[in-house]
Amino acid sequence: MPKFIILYVKYVDAISIKVGRATMYLIFVMIGVLLLGSITRNILHMPLSWTVEMAQFVITAYYIAGGAYSMILREHVRMDLLYEHLSEKNRARLDVFTTFFLLFYLVTLLIGSISSTMYAIEYGQRNFSQWNPSMIPIKIIMVLGIALMILESVSVFFKDLAIAKGSRIS
């Protein structure tokens, strides 16, 4: 593989790993928010209106920002009725082929998320609830997470292409 592809894979993987490892800690934030909501509602009898909605925002950020990291670990959901029985080279060939479908899906998501984020910024979109939070931060996280997944998909494509050709990119 050309040097620029190897550098691309190296740097995109490094960014995805850093973001993914930082994102892993959001699960504790979500647990803390839900625990706070439970304690204030059931023990102190002073329910906080924002806890469930904040937990939803945190788990959304966790899911979106951790997507690229799950691709590196090859821990994403996969239908492996036939895939598991293939050789490593044939798996890589199949992954090279299916990456185009993934990229089409992710680019479509990115276009929609950019449009939605621009709308949220332009009109100051807020969620219709008692808490009434701004939707801008979660939509920006959505755009960045999807963009990182696109970059990581291209990185995985190059790694699979190398395996299909009989070599490896670390």
Image (spheres, helix red, strand yellow):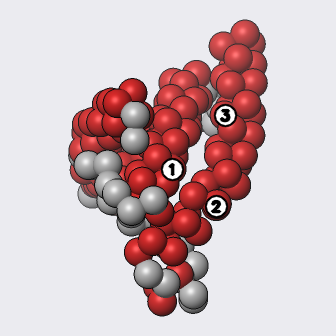
| Alpha carbon separation for disc pair 2 and 1 | 9 Å
Label 1: which residue?
A: 157
| Alpha carbon separation for disc pair 1 and 3 | 19 Å
* Above/below status of 80 relative to 137: below
Callout 3 environment at 10 Å: few (<14), some (14 to 19), or many (20+)? many
The structure residue drawn at horizontal position 66% and vertical position 34%, both measured from the top left corner, is 110
Label 3: which residue?
A: 110
Front-most of 29 and 142? 142
Callout 2 environment at 10 Å: few (<14), some (14 to 19), or many (20+)? few
- Residue 41 in sight from this viewpoint: no
Front-most of 122 and 151? 151
Viewed as shown, does residue 151 lie left or right of 99? left
Of callouts 3 and 2, the N-terminal one: 2
Question: Residue 113 occupies which quadrant of the picture?
Answer: top right
* Above/below status of 120 relative to 19: above
Residue 143 percent coordinates (x, y): 57, 30
- Which three-letter amino acid code belongs to the residue tagged 3? Leu
Of callouts 1 and 3, the N-terminal one: 3
Front-most of 2 and 134? 2
Q: Secondary structure at mark 3?
A: helix
Question: Residue 10 occupies which quadrant of the picture?
Answer: top left
- Which three-letter amino acid code belongs to the residue tagged 1? Phe
Of callouts 2 and 1, the N-terminal one: 2
- Which three-letter amino acid code belongs to the residue tagged 2? Thr
Question: Residue 19 occupies which quadrant of the picture?
Answer: top left
Residue 9 percent coordinates (x, y): 36, 38
Residue 125 percent coordinates (x, y): 69, 21
In the picture, the disc for residue 82 is: none
Kindly report which numbered mark, 3 or 2, lies closer to the viewer in this rendering: 2
Residue 128 percent coordinates (x, y): 69, 33
Label 2: which residue?
A: 98
Kindly report which numbered mark, 1 or 3, lies closer to the viewer in this rendering: 1
